[in-house]
Amino acid sequence: MKYVFSILGIVVGVILAAYAGIWLCFIGGIIDITKEINNAINGVNDISIVGIAWGVIKILIAYPVGYLTFSIFTFLYYAGYNITIHRREINARKRR
């Protein structure tokens, strides 16, 4: 059962990392940039350098955000898995 939870944890970590890194940061940054350019073309407002810079920053930090999300999530599952193993070993020593 612990193997199922470990694999499930890794799968959930991959999904969350893909969501945070790809969707929120990378695609969200592209959407921010295109919205600013579209608003300037349509005459809604002037080009906001801050909006474009924020979009570029989101694109640049997409990989680290995804990597850190995956690393933290899988670390928590590996730590929980190792705690389970150590508890089992301690309980086995007490029974002897």
Image (cartoon, grey):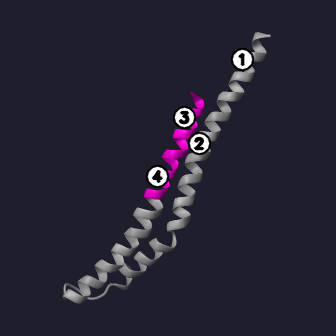
Q: Which residue is mark 4?
A: 16
Residues at circles 4 and 1 in contact by the CB criterion of under 8 Å: no
Task: Using a 10 Å C-alpha cutoff, classify the residue at mark 2 as few (fewer than 14 neighbours), some (14 to 19) or many (20 or more).
Answer: some
Image spot of residue 93 (x, y percent): 78, 16
Q: Secondary structure at mark 2?
A: helix
Quarter holding the N terminus is: top right
Image height check: is 15 above or below 4?
below
Residue topped by disc 3: 5
Identity of the residue drawn at 40% across and 63% down: 24
Quarter-of-image position of residue 88: top right
Mark in front: 4 vs 1? 4
- Real-space Cα distance between discs 4 and 1? 35 Å
Residue at figure coordinates x 56%, y 64% from the top left: 64
Q: Nearer the viewer, mark 4 or mark 2?
A: 4
Label whose residue precedes the other's in the sequence (4 or 1): 4
- Tag 4 or tag 3, which sits nearer the N-term? 3
**C-alpha span from label 3 to label 4:** 16 Å
Q: For this rendering, which residue is in front, 44 or 7?
A: 7
